[in-house]
Amino acid sequence: MKKIYIPLMALAGIGALYEQSKDKPNIYIMIFAIVIFMYGMMRLMAKVPSKNENNSEEDVS
């Protein structure tokens, strides 16, 4: 699944930067690209374990 999100996020980021460089950027395209980028980041970061996950389990026990 990670193989899908990384290129999707890269395309959304490139699309947002390209649209921003225009004289009159379309705000809806930029918003859509940012939403896609943030959704991809959310999905990728959900797979990364917390740095303090093991410590919090030891403190509770």
Image (tube, rainbow, N blue to C red):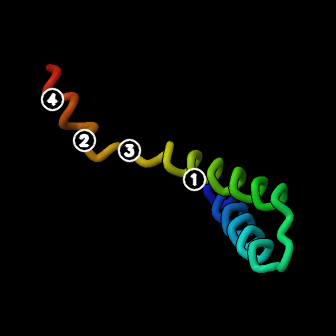
- Please, what is the three-letter code of the amino acid marked with disc 2? Asn
Gap between marks 4 and 3, in whole Å? 16 Å
Q: Which residue is mark 4?
A: 58
Question: How far apart, in angstroms, are the residues tagged by discs 2 and 1?
Answer: 20 Å
Q: Secondary structure under badge 4?
A: helix
Quarter assignment of residue 55 = top left
Q: Nearer the viewer, mark 2 or mark 4?
A: 2
Circle 1/circle 4 CB separation < 8 Å: no
Q: CA distance from mark 3 to mark 2?
A: 9 Å
**31 with respect to 9 (left or right):** right
Nearest to N terminus: mark 2 or mark 4: 2
Residue 49: assigned label: 3
**Can you identify the residue that label 1 sits on?**
41
- 2 or 1: tag closer to the N-terminus: 1
Question: Of callouts 1 and 4, which one flags the residue occurring earlier in the amino acid sequence?
Answer: 1
Residue 28: x and y, percent? 84, 55
Residue located 83% across and 69% down the image: 25
In the depicted view, which residue is nearer to us: 24 or 4?
A: 24
Label 1: which secondary element: helix
In this orientation, which residue lies closer to the viewer: 19 or 54? 19
- Going by the numbered disc 3, the residue's amino acid type is Pro
Count residues near mark 4 (Cα–Cα under 10 Å), then give few for <14, some for 14-19, many for 20+. Answer: few
Which mark, by number, is residue 52? Answer: 2
Helix, strand or loop for disc 2: loop
- Mark 2 and mark 4 residues within 8 Å of each other at the beta carbon: no
Q: Quarter-wise, where is residue 6 in the image? A: bottom right
The secondary structure type at the circle numbered 3 is loop
Characterize the local packing of mark 3: few (<14), some (14-19) or many (20 or more) Cα atoms within 10 angstroms. Answer: few
Q: Is residue 61 above or below residue 48?
A: above
Work out which quarter of the rendered image holds the C terminus and state it. Answer: top left
At 24% from the left and 41% from the top, the residue drawn is 52
Q: Is residue 52 left or right of residue 36?
A: left
